[in-house]
Image: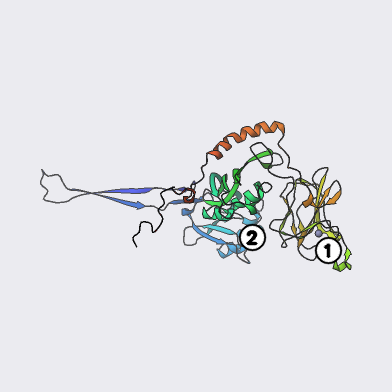
Amino acid sequence: MGNKYSRGIVVLLVVIFSACKETPKNKVPLVKVEIAAVEEPEDVYEFGYNLNDFVVKRDTVRSGDSFGEILERNKVSYPEIFNIAETAKATFDIRRIQLGKPYTLLCSKDSLETPKCFIYQPNLEEYVVIDFNDSIQAYTKKKPITYVEKTATGVINSSISETLLDKGLSPRLAYKLADEIYAWTIDFRRLQKGDRFKVIYTDKYIDDTIYTGIHDIKAAYFEHNKEPFYAFQFETDAEKGIVDYFNEDAKNLRRAFLKAPVQFSRISSRYNLKRRIAVYGFKVRPHKGTDFAAPIGTPIMATSNGTVTKSERRGGNGNYVKIRHNATYETQYLHMSKRNVKVGQFVKQGDVIGWVGMTGNTGGPHVCYRFWVNGKQVDPFKQKLPEAKPISDSLKVEYLDFIKPIKAQLDGIQFEAKPEDFEEPQGETIEPNENLIS
Ligand SMILES: [Zn+2]
């Protein structure tokens, strides 16, 4: 709790000698000792200030509020506000304060309660300080972030979500296991009763106190149909920030392509060369894409690493993006409401390249996903998709070394024994009624 210092408890020893006039000289005077504990207010440090030195006013930016408005309401003169804003400008443009974000005013402790400092929190991790107590100073600071490593185990009874819920674990663990780590290895909709897992993961805390959820999974072990599946997180390219999960033999768990460019979507129209459409008088209009229906604004992800070759709005395609992945593969994503990438940009699998929309020729919000192999459009679902980049031979030695202690740690984690895991004692079962006299 780095920010809290206690001045402690001031212990007063009150020693009262009895003032009895008639105390005989040979008698020890009566001594009464009283211990009283007086607690002083605890120092509370936040944003680098001792909040006890101020009258602290906390609020959130309301509709119609501006920096000037807030200070004016708190009796700061207009020329002074102007002066503060001008000086702070180099660090923080006061026009950037947003509706609903929290701010704190530190005011003098006298009856005037004059504001001395304005602190704005654009997000949980950062805060902007505009201090105008003496000279005007403005700066942005980050709250300290800590990662705490934890482990968890679970046995599947019906679904992974239920298992996590039962154990008070975050549903994000399920998402990460199902969609990030084991998406290509285990079908999480077909888990078996008795399938079980162990994970080593990190929780993220801001300021040691604000829990912001699961940060990452370091390693996992999933037993599906009695088959073990190990996964270890390993960075293969520090420059591009490429982190993958590999098994105990350094095999990449990921495929080179995601199954779909959007999450939680449904396929509304498959690749079909013989599709007939009524609007064209039942003429054959081949559909060389796969349509994924999803609400407007759903993020569209690059299904594989690659370089953006097209990002524009044109005709029936509407807003679309095309990516070249290597000499063989290209993908394209149509009808976006908005694009998020530029031509020439390198994107990683899972990066958001735009959002679902209805631009171009489309009857409803969806993304039309097109897939090329050697310049020919094909059905991505009929392709045997390549494995993601394997670990290079030189890195493999390093990897196997790296995972050794982690695997030992993972193997050392015991599954929690549940009551139903214990077998009934054999041969001692007494049938009801047997010993009963009726
Ligand atoms: Zn389509």
Q: Nearer the viewer, residue 31 or 272?
A: 272
**In the displayed structure image, the side of residue 95 where residue 30 appears, left or right:** left
**Residue labelled with disc 2:** 98
Q: Is residue 367 among what the camera can see? A: yes
Q: Is mark 2 within 8 Å of ligand 1?
A: no
**In the displayed structure image, the side of residue 82 where residue 421 appears, left or right:** left
- Closer to us: mark 2 or mark 1? 1
Mark 1: few/some/many CA within 10 Å (<14, 14-19, 20+): few
Q: Nearer the viewer, residue 407 or 135?
A: 407
Q: Determine which quarter of the picture holds residue 61.
A: bottom right
Residue at the spot 36% in from the left edge and 49% down from the top edge: 9
The spot of residue 413 in percent (x, y) is: 52, 41
Point out the image quarter for the C terminus: bottom left
Q: Is residue 127 among what the camera can see? A: no
Residue at the spot 57% in from the left edge and 59% down from the top edge: 102
Q: Is residue 94 above or below residue 26?
A: below
The spot of residue 119 in percent (x, y) is: 57, 55
Dot 2 falls on a residue whose secondary structure is loop
Q: Which numbered circle lies on residue 361?
A: 1
The spot of residue 275 in percent (x, y) is: 84, 61
Q: Which numbered circle lies on residue 352?
A: none
